[in-house]
Image (cartoon, grey):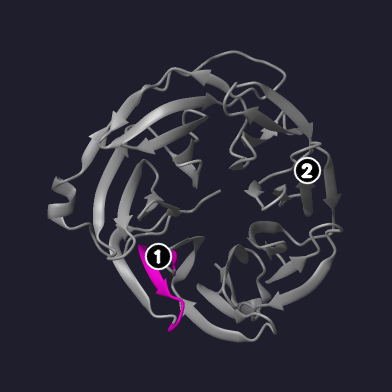
């Protein structure tokens, strides 16, 4: 579950006055069905210059979102026993058996769909061609994932580390260990990871910082206090939440430049970085860091935001919907 950072200062008054407020029709579908079906719902509305082109109803919880291989993937289907895969073009859905416990996340790799099952300590790889599921257990709270070519990295929330996995066997190839937290506390450990050329980035809430490891080797190159994931990559920089604000991290110097946008869940699309707050999505110009627009969605609570197929995809936990949003 995303924990939105507290902003270090109030949004400037001129920014507040320029907010483009939009309200979208949830058209929430009621009822009980065995499969966590993502059904098409009619919801063609706008929020400023963002257009909601389609919504997908979910009958599951908040257990992950990925968009890849022509499908929308969500977790916690069938009462927590499956992943639901819905064809984007047809809306047809099927369930793939993958029992989960809690705080499951889904990630699109270059040739497979991946799931981290935090509660059971399991990482799963789903072949998008055959839908076969391969699982490996024994991980200390697997959380965020990142990919570089066919290299696979996983943050271990209770392991105070990130690990690289063999993409086929799911065996651990290398561990990147963070310093121990005060008192040996392992709760609120590494949650998110990112890969940039020559570097692995790992955040750790119990240390209040993001760490930059050198690749190869694993030497800690930098520690960024007050910075955390989720991360996004845009305009040759890494984007994160730092001291409550969306921030640009220079890959050469590791210098952090704060924007005026609140921190949250970032996604890179077009020339911008879009960041979701609880009920808003803000567009920031990647080259300048200037706020281009901010869009409010009344009654929403966003727990996921990603960019795929030329659109933004968000999960609204209050309406239990995945929505596809296209900048106009």
Residue 96 falls in image quadrant: top right
Identify the residue position indicated by label 2 in the image: 127
- Residue pictured at 79% horizontal, 36% vertical: 131
**Whole-percent x, y for residue 58 in the image:** 58, 27
Q: Which mark sits nearer the N-terminus, 1 or 2?
A: 2
Q: Residues within 10 Å of mark 1 (few under 14, many from 20)?
A: some
Residue 252 part of the magenta-drawn span: yes
**Of 294 and 203, the residue lying toward us:** 294
Query: Is residue 243 shown to the viewer in this render?
Result: no
Q: Nearer the viewer, residue 229 or 288?
A: 288
Instruction: Report which residue position mark 1 lands on.
Output: 235
- Residue 265 screen position, x and y as percent: 45, 53
Report the span colored magenta.
237-253
| Residue drawn where x is 47% and y is 39% of the image | 314
Relative to 17, residue 95 above or below: above
The circle drawn on residue 13 is: none
């Amino acid at each position: 579950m995303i924990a939105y950072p507290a902003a270090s200062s109030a949004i400037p008054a001129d920014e507040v006055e320029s907010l483009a407020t939009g309200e979208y029709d949830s058209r929430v579908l009621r009822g009980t069905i065995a499969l966590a079906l993502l059904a098409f719902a009619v919801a063609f509305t706008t929020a400023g210059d963002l257009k909601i082109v389609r919504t997908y109803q979910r009958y599951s919880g908040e257990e992950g979102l990925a968009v890849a291989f022509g499908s929308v993937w969500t977790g916690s289907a069938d009462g927590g026993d499956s992943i639901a895969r819905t064809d984007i073009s047809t809306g047809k859905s099927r369930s793939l058996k993958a029992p989960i416990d809690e705080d499951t996340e889904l990630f699109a790799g270059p040739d497979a769909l991946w799931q981290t099952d935090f509660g059971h300590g399991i990482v799963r790889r789903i072949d998008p061609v055959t839908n076969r599921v391969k699982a490996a257990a024994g991980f200390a709270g697997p959380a965020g994932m990142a990919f570089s070519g066919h290299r696979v990295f996983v943050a271990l929330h209770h392991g105070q580390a990130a690990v690289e996995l063999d993409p086929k066997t799911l065996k651990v190839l290398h561990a990147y260990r963070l310093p121990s937290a005060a008192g040996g506390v392992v709760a609120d450990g590494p949650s998110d990871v990112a890969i940039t050329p020559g570097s692995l980035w790992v955040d750790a809430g119990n240390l209040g910082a993001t760490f930059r490891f050198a690749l190869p080797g694993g030497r800690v190159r930098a520690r960024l206090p007050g910075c955390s994931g989720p991360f996004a990559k845009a305009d040759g920089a890494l984007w994160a939440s730092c001291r409550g604000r969306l921030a640009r991290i220079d890959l050469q110097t590791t210098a952090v430049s704060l924007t005026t946008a609140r921190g949250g869940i970032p996604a890179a699309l077009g020339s911008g970085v879009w960041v979701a707050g609880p009920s808003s999505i803000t567009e920031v110009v990647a080259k300048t860091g200037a706020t281009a627009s901010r869009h409010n969605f009344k009654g929403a609570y966003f727990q996921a935001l990603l960019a795929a197929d030329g659109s933004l995809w968000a999960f609204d936990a209050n309406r239990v919907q995945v929505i596809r949003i296209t900048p106009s």
